[in-house]
Image (cartoon, rainbow, N blue to C red):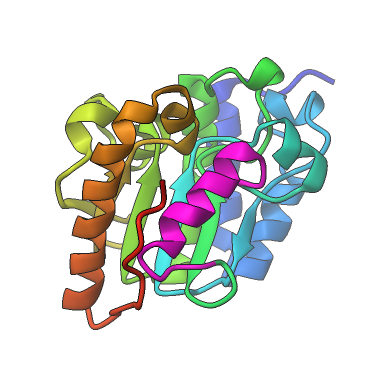
Amino acid sequence: MAPPRPADALAQAQAAAAAATSIEQLCAAIQAFDGCALKRTARQTVTHDGVPGAPVLLVGEAPGREEDEAGKPFIGRSGQLLDRMLGSIGLNRASNICITNAVYWRPPGNRPPSRDELAICAPFVARFVELSQPRLVLFAGGSAAQSLLGTSTGILKLRGQKLDWQGPDGRRVPAFALLHPAYLLRNPAAKALAWADLLRIQDELSALGLATDGQSSPA
């Protein structure tokens, strides 16, 4: 059976997301959702990893091959680099951060998610943020930042500045956009920019009363 038209799929996603009153219910709704064509070619639905409701929430772009096989976000080479980056400022999946994606199914060939795919998943992502009630939101990569912030500004212009995410309920959360770890693996010279961004995030964590012990370079 063919997937519904994008407008119909978006309406279904909005209704399913709004009906969820807990992260557990929301993840079940995402698992049951058939409105995104990516689900037909993916092995698994990848919703999140880490601590649900943690003070910091990171939103990536989409699962890759390793993530599709394991059912968890950011576990391949880029995920290992991400863990080192987060660990350098005292963040880790076991205690104080939750990681999700802007799209829950792997795009074929690890291509970037399309505008329609991002739009269809956006109600679930926004509801995930609302239910998590994080003190700080991080976006890894341009697709995640653009989708959640509703902007076409590129990641190289978004990074390095404090942003503001506003959910459908009107709640505002400070946010930062990071260069995607996969980009850093392809462009090692950009790691200096990433380290500068991590230090800004660490300053914000301290200002929010979420000071951590990290200080070592992730490179």
Which residue is pictured at 19% across the width and 53% down the height? 164
Q: Is residue 82 magenta?
A: yes
Which residue is pictured at 59% across the width and 48% down the height? 80
Q: Is residue 41 magenta?
A: no
Which residue is pictured at 61% across the width and 52% down the height? 16
For the residue pair 197 and 68, the one nearer the viewer reads as: 197
Image: 166 above or below 211: above
Which residue is pictured at 75% across the width and 31% down the height? 39
- Screen quadrant of the N terminus: top right
Q: Start and end of the magenta stretch?
A: 74-92
| For residue 40, side relative to residue 85 (left or right) | right
Image: 132 above or below 27: below
For the residue pair 161 and 4, the one nearer the viewer reads as: 161
| For residue 13, side relative to residue 115 (left or right) | right
Is residue 122 among what the camera can see? yes
Image: 165 above or below 193: below
Residue 139 rendering spot, x and y as whole percentages:
37, 46
For the residue pair 104 and 74, the one nearer the viewer reads as: 74
Image: 2 above or below 164: above
Is residue 125 among what the camera can see? no
Residue 143 rendering spot, x and y as whole percentages:
41, 30
Residue 24 rendering spot, x and y as whole percentages:
67, 68
| For residue 59, side relative to residue 165 (left or right) | right
Residue 152 rendering spot, x and y as whole percentages:
25, 24
Which residue is situated farthest in the bottom direction here?
Answer: 209
